[in-house]
Image: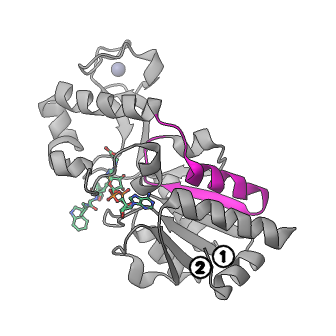
Amino acid sequence: MQFKQEFLDKLKDAKKIVFFTGAGISAESSIPTFRGKDGIWNKMKPEELANFDAFIRNPDLVWEWYQHRRIIVNTALPNAGHTAIAELEKYYDVSVVTQNIDDLHRRAGSTKIFELHGNIERNFCIECHTFYNSPELEITNTAPKCKKCGGLVRPDVVWFGEMLPQDEFSGGEKAAEWSDICFVVGTSAVVYPAAHIPISAKRSGSYIVEINIEPTELSRYTDYSLFGKAGEILPKIVEEVKKSKS
Ligand code: BV8
Ligand code: ZN
């Protein structure tokens, strides 16, 4: 794969790099995306499941859906895309700003991660806010009850209509604004306010590089679009960095 010289020069001079990632970076770890051909939203609507009212209306149905996804996540492994991002920490100050709840960036070895939409491995009681990691819960297909107060326990993910965790969002946005290069990897960039982050990076002068198998809502903002699989392109970028830094 040939990269354009402007990008190679940016890679050479960069100090701070941000990876803004979505479900597409986990597709090669066999975790279904939301909007792809096998996407989650083809089978059910987000409004029906990924929101608080749906959970209150039918906690067991929503819990079962997340339990189904938790099993997929637990059997999944980080792929070459996740590991390439972790490896770049040897050469740059790298921040990962992810919309994913699958914990794969951490499991791949990335150390600075902003989880904008939570993490499927964490849960909390909606009454007393006691947190439970999944292994602490007796996992069945019905929504568990809090050991302290008997309240309903929900996944610690951000549902539609819910605020994003303030520290994660502002930390991720600041990292993107201060970045020399902001990679946008595997996201359709349709969900806000997360999708705003690469736009504010662009406004702050960051060089925006999109890695996706097809153009997206964000493509018109990017300085460079690399079309292909994240798990194939990211390792090639690591190779270029190793060459230029040796
Ligand atoms: C909020 C966690 C307000 C849960 C998720 C109208 C206009 C604008 C906004 C809105 C609107 N109506 C409502 C809103 C707000 C809403 C929103 O943006 N809706 C959209 C759908 C229009 N946003 C919210 O509700 C947010 N909260 O606004 O609160 C508020 C304000 C004040 C006070 C109170 C409240 C909260 C949104 C968070 C929702 N939670 N996830 C869970 O996972 O179950 S969203 C979920 O979808 C993901 O987290 C992600 O953020 C989002 C998008 O998914 P992607 O990651 O991009 O995945 P997708 O499948 O779409 O795309 C995959 C891409 O990868 C594709 O481009 C594909 O080509 C590419 N790809 C595939 N394979 C590969 C690849 N690329 C590279 N390599 C490959 N191998
Ligand atoms: Zn409780």
Q: Residue furthest right?
A: 246
Q: Is residue 187 left or right of residue 46?
A: right
Which residue is most to the front? 1
Residue in the picture at 48% in, 81% down = 222
Residue 74: image quadrant is top left
| Numbered circle sitting on residue 206 | 2
Quadrant hosting ligand 2:
top left
Asked whether 66 falls inside the magenta stretch, the response is: no
At horizontal 33% and vertical 15% (from top left) the residue drawn is 149
Q: Which residues are magenta?
A: 76-102
Report which residue position mark 1 lands on.
180
Q: In this picture, is 123 found above or below 200?
A: above
Whether the residues at callouts 1 and 2 have beta carbons within 8 Å, the answer is yes
Q: CA distance from mark 1 to mark 2?
A: 5 Å
- Counting other residues with Cα less than 10 Å from the Cα at mark 2, is it few (<14), some (14-19), or many (20 or more)? many
Sort mark 1 into few (<14), some (14-19) or many (20+) by Cα contacts within 10 Å: many
